Image: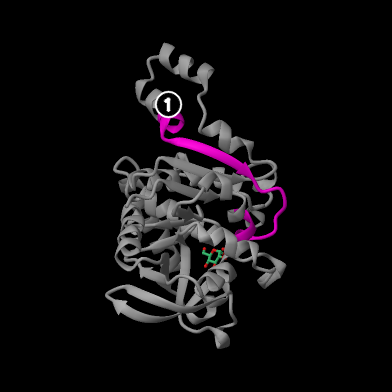
Amino acid sequence: MRIKKAVITAAGWGTRFLPVTKSQPKEMLPLLNKPIIQYSVEEAIACGIDLVVIITSMGKRAIEDYFDHHFELESMLERKGETRLLEEVRRSSNMVDIGYIRQKEQLGLGHAVLTAKNMVGNEPFFLMLPDDLFENRELVLKEMMRIYENYQGSVVAVKRVAEDEVNRYGIIEYKQVADRIFKVIDLVEKPRSEDAPSDLAIMGRYLLPPEIFGAIQETSPGRNGEIQLTDALRRLLKQRPLYAYEFEGERWDAGTLPGWLEVTIALALQEPEIAPRLRKYLHKISSETASAV
Ligand code: G1P
């Protein structure tokens, strides 16, 4: 079985990045010289996706423009013989078929996913939250696909978090079935640490069956008064099993300022043209800070 479609949510306000997000979608903030959302699109393509559905909202037109052709810019670069830049610019508009759908009211993640119902149709699909970025980018979705096939159930990516962080995530109650694979018994959105069933938190990648749409339709507003995807998954548990994959390697949350800074540095350290200079600079400021203490 091959998963052909990936849904990427990009409809949120980006309040944690205000004021820059006042006139600029959060998903278009740069991680080095590419916008945050491009990393998810590339991750989906690496996994063989044919159609990416991006859920947007008011004020997000820059995303559509970014993945479109820019004739004036391209012909200027061509005239100047800037071949490498031209390739980069063209690449962003030729990557994959992208469909857009608008979430007209901000009623929660579950509600956002429901807007993609007709574009997804009656087949399983990946859901990707673009703020979450992974060190082993291509591996996570591929492993999830394997689990979907082997166990015939929906799959979420999970990672262990500290006790004081469980209230930021969907947390699962589980039974381990194999190395790094868990059968989900229950799940709860953003519990208080004393109520959390475990320390395994859902991290922005889901492999979902089309039945999720019906489950969302039946889900009432939950945490923060929003229609939560976690609650819909909980409802779906009655019909279909759900598995969790504990991926290896780092995960960053580019949706917070510290997370965005960390992933920027981690990515820069992978770039041969930038890494030596950055490493020297980080060393210099860390020894300066140490001697100041
Ligand atoms: C969403 C989900 C949550 C999940 C998290 C991962 O929360 O509702 O279950 O753990 O993404 O990043 P949000 O970060 O949108 O508040």
Q: Based on the displayed image, in which of its 4 quarters is residue 182 positioned?
A: bottom left
Q: Position of residue 291 (x, y in %)?
A: 42, 68
Q: Based on the displayed image, in which of its 4 quarters is residue 148 positioned?
A: bottom left
Q: Is residue 29 visible?
A: no
Q: Position of residue 201 (x, y in %)?
A: 47, 72
State yes or no: Cβ of the residue under disc 1 lies below 8 Å from any atom of ligand 1: no
User: Is 188 a magenta residue?
Assistant: no
Question: Is residue 174 left or right of 248 when viewed as pictured?
Answer: right
Q: Position of residue 81 (x, y in %)?
A: 37, 15
Going by the numbered disc 1, the residue's amino acid type is Arg
**Residue visible at 39% across and 76% down in the picture:** 183
Q: Residue furthest left?
A: 179
- Please tell me how crowded label 1 is: few (under 14), some (14-19), or many (20+) other residues with Cα within 10 Å: some
Q: How many marks?
A: 1
Instruction: Check disc 1 and report the residue beneath it.
Output: 90
* Position of 197 relative to 241 (above/below): below
* Position of 202 relative to 96 (above/below): below
Question: Quick check: which quadrant has ligand 1?
Answer: bottom right
Q: Nearer the viewer, residue 66 or 112?
A: 112
Q: Position of residue 292 (x, y in %)?
A: 47, 68
* Magenta stretch bounds: 91-112
**Residue visible at 67% across and 71% down in the picture:** 222
Q: Nearer the viewer, residue 115 or 267?
A: 115
Q: Secondary structure at mark 1?
A: helix
